[in-house]
Amino acid sequence: MAKLLDLNCDDTVHSYNLLTGTLALVEGTRQITPSEGVISETMDLISAVGSTDQNIIRAENEINEIGYLARQWGTDRSRTFTCWLEENAASETKRRALLKDCIVMRKEGANTSLLLGRQGVSLWTLYLSYRELWEPASAEALAFTTKSLWGGHFQATPSARLEGVLDGRISEAKASTFSASMGELWLGIRSPRESGVTLPDFTPVFELEYGTTLIADTTKTSEVGASPSGSSTNNRLTCTFATSANMADRVQLSVQQALTQGVGGSAVFTSMIGRYMVLLRAKVDSGTTARIRLYSGNTNGMRPFRDIDITNTVYRLIPIGEINIPSVSFRFEVGGSTGIAGNHLLKIGAERISGAGSLFLDALCLIPSDHLAYGKSASGSNFNWLSWYTFADDGVVAFDKSSGIDFEITNVVDYFMSNFFMPWSGGRCVLAGQSANPATVHSLTATASINLSHLARWKTFSDYA
C-alpha cells in the first residue's frame, strides 16, 4: 500500500488527501503536542504550482467542512458519521485516529500577491485535533458459537498483528442464536493481566456443595434441577432454618475447594485471580422470603456485601456482590497449592424474613467484571438478539431485537457497560443469561452465539509501524 495521509469522513462523501491534494503537506513541518488524551497537530500545506483560485478555494472548503463535521459529531449525538485522520507508511495497513477538529488558515505574508488572489505558490497552516488513539480502518471479527449461558467460557485472542498496545475497542458484541428464551445477559472478559499468562484451570462456576456447611440446618441434598446439568452429582444446599431463622453463616467455600473438586487435585489456583460479579443460583419454597448476605475475604477477615431478598420459587441468577480474588493486592500472590488465591473464601449468610419454607442454594457463577457488559429487557419480552456497542469516542449503547420490532433502545434495554474493552493480549470471556420472565427457571443447558467486532488500539502511530 502506498503512503497515505488523509482526512476522511465515514459518509464516503467528504475526504481530502494531504499528500496529493491541491494543498499538500510540506514534509518536515508536522508539529505534535499531546495533552490529556488529545493530540494537537499543526502542519504546513503548500499549493501546487499553477493552482487556480477556484481549486485552492475548493481545497480550503473541503478541509474546513470535514472540521465542521468532526465538531458536530462530537456535540450532536444524532450524528452518524465519524471523521478521521488516516495514515499509513508505505508497507503498513491503514490506521486512523478520531478527528475532533481541523481548520486550514493561510499564512500571513506567505504570498506577496495576497491582494491579487490565492493562485500561485502559497503556504497554509493546517490545525488538527484528534484522539491520542489509533485504530485499524476495519474491525477484526471474533466468532464463538454454542456457548453455555451458565458460566460458559472461551478464549478471545486477537490476531498477533492486531493486539495493539492498549485495550482494544469492541465496536459490537452481539449475543444471538439462543437455544432457550433469554431476556437478561452478562458478558465479562477476564484479563490475563500480563502477556503470556495462561489460565489452565479457570473455572467460573463454583458448586456450593463443595464448600463447608457452618450450621446444622444447612445440608447437601440431591436435586435433578441442580447444577451441574446431566451430572450424577446434581446437589444443592438446603437451608431449613430449623436451627435458627435469624441471620447466620450457612456455607463457606474456598477457591481451593471449588477448583480441587471441579478440576482436580493439581488445580492452579492463580487461574482465578481477578475481579468478579458474583451470581447466585438459588430459590425458596412458595410463600417464603429469605435474605442472603455474601462475604468475601480470608480467615483474617471477610467483607460483607449488601443484603439481598429472595422470593423466587424457581432457580434464578441473582447478583449478590462484586469481589476481588484475592482480596489483597495481586502482587502479594505467591501461588502454590495453598497460596493466597487458593485460600480466598466466599461465605453466604442467610435468614428467613417470612413464611415457613426453606432456602435452596445451588451454585455461584463468577462473571469477570474488569471488562463487563450487562443487558436486561425492561419490557418483559425476551431477546432475539442483543448487541452492545462502543463508539469511537468510547460512548456506549445497547440494542435488542424482539418480536416484530427491529431495534429497541435504552428505554427497553436496561444495560450497563463497565470498561468493556478487549484486553490488549486477549482475554477469557464468561457468559451467563436467563429468561426475562421471573417465573421461568434458569436453564443449565441453554446456549448462545457470541460475535465480537474488535478494533486494536495503539497509543501512537509509530507503535504499529
Image (cartoon, rainbow, N blue to C red):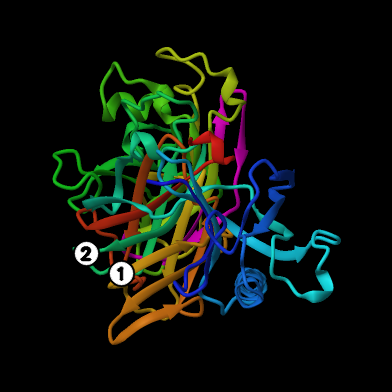
The image quadrant of residue 380 is bottom left
Residue at the spot of label 2: 177
Callout 1: SS: strand
Where is residue 169 drawn, in percent x and y?
48, 51
Which residues are drawn in magenta? 288-315
Specify whether residue 303 is painted magenta.
Answer: yes
Specify whether residue 298 is painted magenta.
Answer: yes
Amino acid beneath label 2: Thr
Amino acid beneath label 1: Trp
**Residue at x-position 32% and y-position 74%:** 382
What residue occupies the far bottom of the structure in this picture?
404
Q: Would you say residue 362 is visible in this rendering?
A: no
Residue at the spot of label 1: 385
Q: Upstream in the sequence, badge 1 or badge 2?
A: 2
Where is residue 288 drawn, in percent x and y?
42, 64
Determine the CA span between mark 1 and mark 2.
7 Å
**Residue at x-position 73% and y-position 71%:** 118
Asked if residue 332 is positioned above or below residue 449 in the image, the reply reads above
